[in-house]
């Protein structure tokens, strides 16, 4: 069983590596960001409430996020394991997660801030299937169109410069302390994710995780 979380600042590549790991191990990639965006798209009460925070580059309150994650981890496809992306972000969330499930791996993707700004500045996402592309690093075959489903590509509000700076500040203030929390549990594996070739970084993660 591989119950893991990916920790890294916005733009560290969590979504990209999670997709590769999902295919490798046959366990679901659970992105709280994607779940909230789906709720926002469907204009659910939770989505409407979350949108106000996300649009400003702020974190959604713990109570909303924990409830969302708890319900998701109870689904049958999580029996063999899961990959959490975007949760936990704070120590209080980590403590709440401890009461929900037992983790086996914590992957910390270390990336320089200058690299993050370059990556996020060109990131675009599909409105329909949430696939992620990059204007220079990983452009779609046809500009503005998703290779996978033909959906429209757009720049998320939280990928705009003002929101990026706020989210990086929040990461250093609230999320970075998680490393110390999980270090004490001997769960953390540090990965150099500055490499521009995603598969090479993914291979290093897979080597750490094992079969």
Image: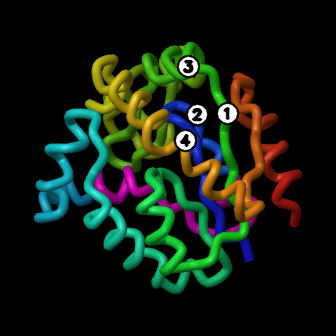
Residue 27 drawn in magenta: yes
Measure the C-alpha gap from mark 2 to mark 3. 9 Å
Left or right of 94, for residue 158: left
Start-end of magenta stretch: 21-38
Tell me the SS state at disc 3: helix
- Is disc 1 in contact with disc 2, using a CB cutoff of under 8 Å? yes
Is residue 45 shown above or below 116? below
Dot label at residue 113: 3
Q: Nearer the viewer, mark 1 or mark 2?
A: 1
> Which residue is disc 4 drawn over?
176
In the rendered image, residue 79, in percent from the top left (x then y), is placed at 61, 84
Measure the C-alpha gap from mark 2 to mark 4. 13 Å
Marked residue nearer the N-terminal end (3 or 4): 3
- Is disc 1 in contact with disc 3, using a CB cutoff of under 8 Å? no
Q: Give the residue displayed 62% in from the left and 77% down from the top.
A: 102
In the rendered image, residue 131, in percent from the top left (x then y), is placed at 47, 43
């Amino acid at each position: 069983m591989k119950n893991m979380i990916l920790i890294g600042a916005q733009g560290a590549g969590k979504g990209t590596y999670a997709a590769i790991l999902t295919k490798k191990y046959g366990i679901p990639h659970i992105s709280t960001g994607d779940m909230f965006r789906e709720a926002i798209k469907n204009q659910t009460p939770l989505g409407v409430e979350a949108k106000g925070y996300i649009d400003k580059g702020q974190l959604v309150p713990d109570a909303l996020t924990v409830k969302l994650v708890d319900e998701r981890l109870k689904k049958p496809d999580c029996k063999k394991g899961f990959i959490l992306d975007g949760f936990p972000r704070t120590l209080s969330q980590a403590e709440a997660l401890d009461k929900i499930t037992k983790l086996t791996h914590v992957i910390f993707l270390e990336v320089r801030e200058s690299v993050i700004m370059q990556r996020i500045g060109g990131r675009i996402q599909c409105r329909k299937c949430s696939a992620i592309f990059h204007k220079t690093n990983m452009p779609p075959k046809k500009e503005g169109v998703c290779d996978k489903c033909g959906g429209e590509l757009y720049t998320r509000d939280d990928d705009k410069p003002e929101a990026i700076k706020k989210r990086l500040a929040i990461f250093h203030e609230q999320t970075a302390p998680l490393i110390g929390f999980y270090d004490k549990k001997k769960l953390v594996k540090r990965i150099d994710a500055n490499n521009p070739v995603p598969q090479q970084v993914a291979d290093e993660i897979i080597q750490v995780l094992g079969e």
